[in-house]
Image (cartoon, rainbow, N blue to C red):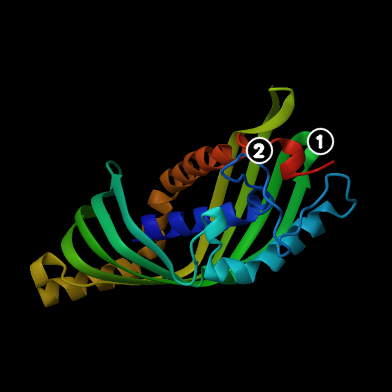
Amino acid sequence: MFRFETRFIIIIIVSLILCNCNIAVGKTEDNKIKKIPTFLKICSQSDPNLNGCVKDSVEKLRPHLVTGIPEFGIPPCEPLIVPEIVINQGKGPVTVQSTYTNIHVTGASQFVIKSIKVEPAKDRVRLKLWLPFLHMISDYDLDGKILMMPITGKGMSEGNYTDIEANVLMEGERFEKKGQTYFNVKDFFVHFNIGHASIRLDDLFNGDKELGDAMNSFLNQNWESIVDEIKPVLEDRISDMFKTFSNNIYHKYPLDMILPP
């Protein structure tokens, strides 16, 4: 559960924050630019308080993130519902093949922007985030080893995570297309830390309660070691996934629409 839950929620939070200006512009079926909704605040590159403007824009957007913004394809984030995630970790002390379905996440809308630094001249964004808590439930199916301990099971999972910090660095470059300037993300880096975690996996070892209780106790006693083992892989996957997601948006709209002069 640590692998999916932490990774996915960081992707969602970072996506909503860094793309809040991007979603402000869309196209209608006849290819005309949509009118910008009044609840979306667009920031200018020349604003001497650009960082504060972007932060304020996100705060104004927060209530709409809770309920979702269908016109921009943003689903409700309270709860955030994900149909399925498949994760395979094939080497090291943690080796598991796992599938999570019917995933419900609460707490995502409570993110706090600790700091944000937008540098248009350098095509760079630095961001620090904090989440007080996340609560997650899902169905799971997994098999493998965790810190050399065999684990297998299929059932319901529940996790509680608190004091989550994330540091994000995005670097890009500009390119010309049809006489207009667009933005391309070259590198995207995420580093995160979790203050505390507790989980419960039901029906481990074909429902053997004694073995299941022992494994749940083992997981909760060793959660920090488990996270340390898988964090480099998680951070790489987060970076790759968001780079692709981000460029799908940036390549669609000219830079002057996303971040006007």
Question: As drawn, is 229 to the left or to the right of 101?
Answer: right
Residue 237 in the image: above or below residue 177: below
Residue 259 visible in image: yes
**Comparing labels 2 and 1, the label whose residue is closer to the camera:** 2
Question: As drawn, is 126 to the left or to the right of 159?
Answer: right
The three-letter amino acid code for the residue at tag 2 is Tyr
SS assignment at label 1: helix
The quadrant holding residue 41 is bottom right
**Residue toward you, 226 or 116:** 116
Residue assigned mark 2: 253
Please count the marks in the image: 2
Q: Position of residue 116 (x, y in %)?
A: 73, 54
The quadrant holding residue 257 is top right
Residue displayed at 38% across by 50% down: 229
Residue displayed at 62% across by 72% down: 63
**Residue toward you, 105 or 64:** 64
Residue assigned mark 1: 121
Residue 148 visible in image: no
**Residue toward you, 1 or 219:** 1
Q: Disc number at residue 144? A: none
Q: Quadrant of the C terminus?
A: top right
Residue displayed at 71% across by 60% down: 40
| Residue that lies at the very extreme toward the front in this rendered image | 30
Q: Calculate the distance from the C-alpha at mark 2 to the C-alpha at mark 1.
A: 19 Å
Q: Earlier in the sequence, mark 2 or mark 1?
A: 1
Q: Residues within 10 Å of mark 2 (few under 14, many from 20)?
A: some
Residue displayed at 10% across by 72% down: 207
Q: Quadrant of the N terminus?
A: bottom left
Q: Position of residue 110 (x, y in %)?
A: 58, 72
Q: Position of residue 202 (x, y in %)?
A: 21, 72
The three-letter amino acid code for the residue at tag 1 is Ala
